[in-house]
Amino acid sequence: MFIDGKWVDARSGKTFDVTNPATGEVLGSVPAGGSEDAVAAIDAAHASFSEWSNTTAYERSRLLYRAWELMTERSEALAELMTVEQGKPLKASRAEVKYAADFLIWFAEEAKRVTGEWLPSQRPDQRFLSVKAPVGVVAAITPWNYPISMLTRKMGPALAAGCTLVLKPAEATPLCAKATYEVFVDAGIPDGVINLVTAVDPAPVGEVFTSDPRVAKLTFTGSTAVGRVLAAKSAANLKRISVELGGHAPFIVFPDADPVHAAKGAAALKFLNAGQACISPNRLYVPTSLRSAFEETLCSRVEKLRTGNGMDEGVGVGPLINDLAVAKVERQVEDAREKGAGVPVGGVRLLEDGYASGHFFAPTVLTDVREDMTIYREETFGPIAPVIAYDDPDEVIELANDTNYGLAAYIYTRDIAVAMRAFEGLRFGIIGVNDVNPTSASVPFGGMGDSGLGREGGHEGISEYLETKTGGFAI
Ligand code: NAD
């Protein structure tokens, strides 16, 4: 763990092992932190806040810029670490490290764009000034599926704004968090400004993060169930919150679209990170008229995907993070099969040689998926593409919106009016129009409804770490 500028063990002396999800091999062990360690981390972040928040925006920008340079220089080593710890194919890890570094350079620049304004007064002897101030100590909790970029998406804007922070990474990926912290340490971050608490049992640390009065804000990325609990606890203590949660993205092919092009997009998008992405499509709506062309292309693409260890050349789909994740996917597929879905490709756990010690599920296509199936409503987080046939394009937006989640949605059409109407009608925070990657450090990321509160990235990203201060000056 990293507390007050030093690499330290847990107060309890306990540790836990980190394993490779493709092989079961133990990669190392890290401190099993608890509530006392979380308090020590907050002590350090609190003590360093005054000095850090009084640095100039130019100094903070330079530090973030240096961190971006170092992350970029180390990208290959970071990508390899990510693949062995989290499982995604090396090519995808390289893309994530680049995305992670993008947040550093974006917020290095945003640090210098925090401004205020003069505002009018009714009184001739009065002037109003409104400025932005850093919120204070930030507590951050991150997931395992994007184990470096989910850190920089929070650390970049928090540091740019002048906040100090304590962070607890997911128990499956603490080594990526450690390597990210090493980048900041080598970039010259002052002691106490960033603190890292690793834990195998996250609850006691979460309890401290949401109750310690010195924490001004909680920023969380993870499941809706956990985010809801942590948001409620934080709200009871009047902390600011940003929660980036689960999703259940619709992917709508309109009748005028090219079904082959759309199916290629679906195959590329759905199996990224073995489907373990909050913006992964979970419902593929295809008009009956295009169904056979779409399903044929999708199935032939999915059949060709190679599943295996992400370090091996040509592997497109890695393991799932653990056995519970495989069991969840298996349950959803079985439920769909029992209720009448077709399974033209995949549908099984992979257990034979080469897969036996990892957590693998075959890339799968489900057809004839209907509303009464669990997969229609529950986030999958696995390599399953569920196809739903529809007839009425006027109703499909309503079907797509019929979810508590509102993170990402995708549409395929060649008609600009159809695209515009769908963009306006969909209740989702991120919409890809003939585009399978509608994300970037430069644009806001976040969802509606049960997908969370707040936005990360873009111009809005830094405002989550700032509060407004008004001055009335009598002259
Ligand atoms: P998770 O909620 O189980 O864990 C997320 C983090 O919360 C981990 O660090 C975990 O240790 C911690 N945590 C769990 N219980 C806690 C508690 N009681 N107190 C404090 N911390 C606790 O989610 P996960 O399985 O790691 O991640 C997958 C989920 O994250 C999916 O639902 C996915 O959609 C979502 N996600 C959302 C986004 C987004 O930006 N919206 C991005 C990535 C992942």
Image: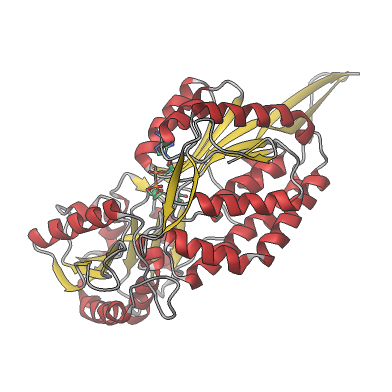
Residue positioned 58% across, 56% down in the render: 443
Above or below residue 473? Residue 132 is below
For the C terminus, give its image quadrant: top right
Q: Is residue 411 visible?
A: yes
Residue nearer the viewer, 292 or 328: 328
The answer to which image quadrant residue 358 occupies is: bottom left
For the N terminus, give its image quadrant: top right
- Position of residue 253 in the picture relative to residue 368 (left or right): right
Residue 95, position as x, y percentages in the image: 54, 68
Residue nearer the viewer, 378 or 470: 378
- Position of residue 268 in the picture relative to residue 185 (left or right): left
Residue nearer the viewer, 430 or 392: 430
Residue positioned 32% across, 54% down in the render: 322
Residue 459, position as x, y percentages in the image: 64, 49
Above or below residue 181? Residue 342 is below
Q: Is residue 457 visible?
A: no
Ligand 1 is in which quadrant of the figure? top left
- Position of residue 466 in the picture relative to residue 475 (left or right): left
Above or below residue 152? Residue 265 is below
Residue positioned 39% across, 54% down in the render: 425
Q: Residue furthest right?
A: 475
The answer to which image quadrant residue 122 occupies is: top right
Residue positioned 71% across, 44% down in the render: 160
The mark total stands at 0
Residue 414, position as x, y percentages in the image: 41, 75
Residue nearer the viewer, 312 or 150: 312
Residue 148, position as x, y percentages in the image: 55, 55
